[in-house]
Image (cartoon, coloured by chain):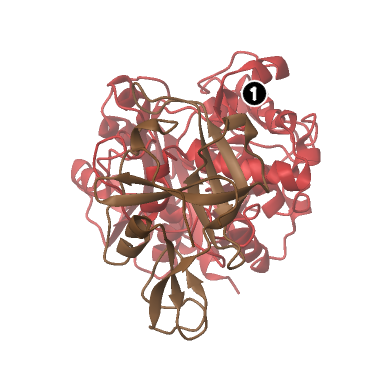
Chain colours: A brown, B red
Amino acid sequence: MTFPPAVAAEDLPGGPVQPLPLVSLLSADFWSGGAKGELRILRCQDCGFYVHPPRPVCARCLSRRLEPEAVSGNASVYTFSINVQPWYPGQSVPYVVAIVELPEQAALRLTTNILGCGVDDVAIGMAVRAVFVEVEDVFIPMFEPGVAT
Amino acid sequence: MRSPEQQAVISGIGTSAVGRRLGRAGLDLTIDACLEAIADAGLTRDDIDGLATYPGFRPDPPGMSPVGVSDVKEALALPLNWYAGAGEGPGQLIGLFSAIGAVAAGLARHVLLFRTVTESSAQTAGRRASVNGTDGERVQARFEWSVPYKAMSAATLVGLMAQRHMHEFGTTREQLGAIALNGRRNAQRNPAAVYRDPLTMDDYLASRMISTPLCLYDCDVPVDGSAAFIVSHVDTLPELAHPPVRVEAIGTSLLGRDSWDQRADLTTMGAFDAASMLWSRTDLRPADVDVAELYDGFTYLALQWIEALGFCGHGEGGPFVEGGKRIAFDGEIPLNTHGGQLSAGRLHGYGFLHEACTQLWDRGGEHQVPGTPEVAVVGTGGGPLGGCVLLTRSR
């Protein structure tokens, strides 16, 4: 699969990613997959269930055999909110916070930002694909209109 | 045969001044509320053998919980058999539920329960209340998955839910606005409310957007203030100054995901789980409820509680509140009779509990609902967090 190249962190609507996630032993794969253009979700190797946020046991079958797997990078906008109020001095607004649903599993969702279109162009059901924003040691998955190829 | 929660009663209530920038220490406000509650129950300091709060002392976000159990234990020199200040649980009322549990288990006879906020003063001091992730520290646990995307305020998280509700059910801004206007109308009857100026639908629709679809008047108001309660064992009735408020049933369950984005249906959330448990523990039905005090940290959350508790069907909350007649002071289910957090200030759930008791004791004065309310429901929390309690007048 091919992903678009990483998006420049300084060009993000809403200002830079702030604060960054505190990467844990469980979440390291999720936050580093973008280095290889991969959106990685932890998956049960016994029953195939995706477990997100990452946890050391399958919520469906209780298997302990979980591995990060690259998913398609496609998603659809499940819901969104245009944040208009700045939350710290100098924060640029507006920006879109969205919950997107991945096609790989029902209710497998990410809270994220939508890039690459005007805030008023975002709609529920819109097809989006993952892009990555590199900041310090993490690659933050975000989404833009389109379908991953 | 009494259920465990029916072993507990609320025997006294108290509140400090509640308002914007009061310029008083959180503990100072807390002691006002606590001493009033102890006196209201007809008890003395020496009768108190349990102490509870939610969520316990927290340095951050500023003013969110400046007073913990240790502060009150020490200030009032309370000899305690049981105490707890817990933050993780079914919404803000975890403090009440843990007090009920302690009383029902026989660990304490009279639990002093309090909740204190100084978010208004904290905000004035230059730090924004109720916003996560502005201190430069990296975020972890639940916040790891939302705050890096600048979902820094609950307004955005709840805006996401409200937008989905609008998409699925055609809910409108005017319908959410009906809840804001209802709160303001009730606040005009309540001298202790923070915002009492008239609010029109035009004002509501013209106010600035915070995080779509929620505007300024969809959001509650941070205040300084404290509320306190005495949760007593039912066997202590002879010691009490007046007939207590009875605890009929509680709802504390979380059956779906503990998450703001992974639950199968984002238009139900924790409130629905808690409400279903509550109704499974009583013979009373939604139609028996005379007063509803439902969390309105954001208007949408009150709408969700109305649906969750079965006052209307799932998705029917918009039409139910439209125009405001059903939820009015003299309507079929009076809602947030003190003004709610939207107009009376954010005591973070405990203002609703205080108001429910006020109504069941006929102490509402100008905002006492018509008739003699026998049954009140309090539901608090949003997203995966939800807890509710059904209260009745002593007969």
* Amino acid type of the residue tagged 1 in the rendering: Glu
The residue beneath circle 1 is B366
Query: Who is closer to the viewer here, B106 or B153?
Result: B153
Q: Quadrant of the C terminus of chain A?
A: bottom right
Looking at the image, residue A98 sits to the left or right of residue B317; the answer is left
Query: Who is closer to the viewer here, A60 or B386?
Result: A60
Q: Give residue B349's position: percent from left, percent from top.
A: 49, 42
Q: Quadrant of residue B329?
A: top right
Query: Who is closer to the viewer here, B358 or A23?
Result: A23
Please give the name of the residue rendered at 75% of the width and 49% of the height, measured from the top-left corner.
B315
Element marked by disc 1: helix
Seen in the picture, residue B225 relative to B65 is either above or below; the reply is: above
Q: Give residue B72's position: percent from left, percent from top.
A: 25, 44
Looking at the image, residue B124 sits to the left or right of residue B9; the answer is left
Looking at the image, residue B45 sits to the left or right of residue B360; the answer is left
- Residue B293 visible in this rendered orientation of the protein: no
- Residue A41 visible in this rendered orientation of the protein: yes
Q: Give residue A117's position: percent from left, percent from top.
A: 56, 34
Q: Chain of mark 1?
A: B
Seen in the picture, residue B23 relative to A7 is either above or below; the reply is: above
Looking at the image, residue B303 sits to the left or right of residue B354; the answer is right
Q: Give residue A92's position: percent from left, percent from top.
A: 41, 24
Please give the name of the residue rendered at 76% of the width and 36% of the height, measured from the top-left corner.
B321
Q: Quadrant of residue B84?
A: bottom left
Seen in the picture, residue B220 relative to B98 is either above or below; the reply is: above
For the residue carrying disc 1, how many other residues have a C-alpha within 10 Å: few (<14), some (14-19), or many (20+)?
few
